[in-house]
Amino acid sequence: MPEIRPLTMRQLREKAMRLPLSSGVYLMKDRHGKIIYVGKAKALKNRVSQYFGSQRNHGIKVVRMVEHVADFDYILTDSEFEALVLECSLIKQYAPKYNILLKDDKGYSYIRVSNDGWPMISAVLQKADDGATYIGPYTSHFTVSNAVDEALKIYRLPRCGKTFPRDVGKGRPCLNYFIKQCSAPCAGKIGEQEYRETVEQALLFLKGGTADALRDLERRMTEAADNLEFEKAARLRDRIAAIKRSADRQKVYSAAVEEQDVFALVSEKEKSCFFVLRFGEGRLRESEFFIIDTPEDAAECRTELLRSFYSMDRTVPPRISLDGEMEDAELMGRWLSEKAGRKVTIAVPQRGEQMQLVELCRKNAAEKLMQASGHVSRQATALRELAQLLGLADIPEYIEAYDISHTAGSDNVAGMVVFRDGLPFKRAYKRFAIKGFTGQDDYASMAEVLHRRFTHYLEEKDSGEGFGKLPDLILLDGGQGQVHAVQPVLRELGVSVPLFGMVKDSRHRTRAIAADGGEIALTSRRSAFTLVSEIQEEVHRFVPHAPKRS
């Protein structure tokens, strides 16, 4: 992306003062022409000019954003509502750095149904090209696992490691059969046709929920009784009772509104937790949380959070309850109503059952924030110690660590793990096949991998993501030899990043940090020692068949 000529603060303000007093969307750009913020305004001139006036009235986030603004564009709309719709669309398209963007690092889960005569139902984290049917994705693995487990119990489906039809009739029933949680196909207690029908009913329960499953079972029970199939009717009656017991156990409150989302925003000095409880059929079906930087304006933040949440392909319920006021509530309600295809009510409950649900949500948010703050505090201490120990000017928030693996001198592989804010950032992990030579040479292998990695950086640095992101610190598994092998590579490419090695003792425990002029001792009483040990163990774990070396 070609660089643009940055405007001065005075030029930006003059340009903003020439804007019309019309509704529209504005797009802030950095010197590379990349969109870093998208906003809407009822009157563009008034809103945009505020950014380029006195900075004393702005919070830290706005000041930082304005420092990176080189120019801006704008799009006029016929109404403020059209501006909101366009703003949501552009934010989803460009993912600007300074907009609040909720990211689900937890990944997605699926319900897997094997494709054979005796289908097996399970909860999995990833889809595979194995011919099975996958239902999803779902955002909460905990919810999916619980739902599958409940369905297997209610419909008495096996969860063992046996394979059908191979193992049909070849064994004695296990305990699950005697406690009425399995129909024991392994002992020939159920035929293939009935088993398949049971799987279909279980899938209806998982996809349609309690109400659909109960209607289907009650219809089948009535048909069985009319046909004098009393044993079958009794089994269906037992399933109906099991589903009702399950629903009663999961019903946290007998909510008057059967389908709704409840949100709470709990803040501390630096971090906040945005928590949502999602109810369906009068019971809690799912919960999610997001840790964000503490906002300067809670009402404005709630609006941005809801916009971001429902832009992630979430279903929109008929009612949304909040723990506090939000900006542009009427516009957001109209946007969500159009998105859902029916009226959506946004409310801030003050009493009764709805207020209890909000308090429950706030309690969960506070708990998650407390847990997250504990992690943040420990990791921040370790990173500060590490920066002081290594003489770094800044805290290394983004650390890359490398290791080489080989099997008898062949199949050379390198691995890169990333720690972000002192914690593993697994989506950024990479493996490299060594291509430049054959045989065993850890130094040459490390040099090749770092050369390839930072060649990618020079090609992609405008993106600021993936290989286009420059780490704050590089750690190599090994001593000064690895460091000396890589230093010429970084100099050749013109890359300036602090570079150190991680040294182990004869018992394969982290002992020291290898620097250009020698070693820096680590003491096990320091948080930095624990962090470096975790990084070295993680890169060993990630690289397949990695031999232990000192």
Image (cartoon, helix red, strand yellow):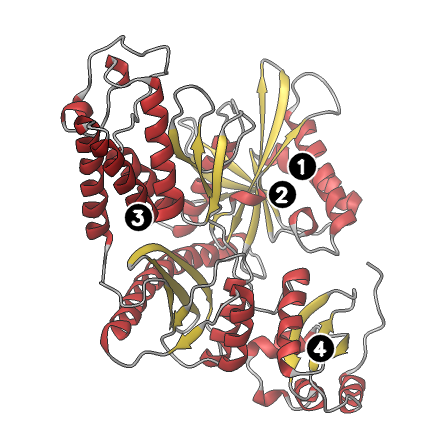
Give the amino acid type for the residue marked by disc 1 in the picture: His
Residue with the mark numbered 4: 26
Q: In which quarter of the image is residue 537?
A: top left
Please name which of the two marks, 2 or 3, marks the residue nearer to the observer. 3
Give the amino acid type for the residue marked by disc 4 in the picture: Tyr
From the top left corner, tell me how far across and down residue 419 is, in percent: 52, 48
Q: Do the residues labelled 2 and 1 touch (CB within 8 Å)?
A: yes
Give the amino acid type for the residue marked by disc 2 in the picture: Asp
Q: Is mark 2 on a helix, strand or loop?
A: loop
Mark 2 or mark 3, which has the lower sequence index?
3
Give the amino acid type for the residue marked by disc 3 in the picture: Thr
* Inter-mark Cα distance, 3 to 1: 64 Å
Above or below for 338 versus 416: below
Q: Is residue 218 left or right of residue 18?
A: left
Q: Is mark 4 on a helix, strand or loop?
A: strand
From the top left corner, tell me how far across and down residue 504 is, in percent: 46, 33
Determine which of the numbered discs, if any, sits on residue 210 in the image.
Answer: 3
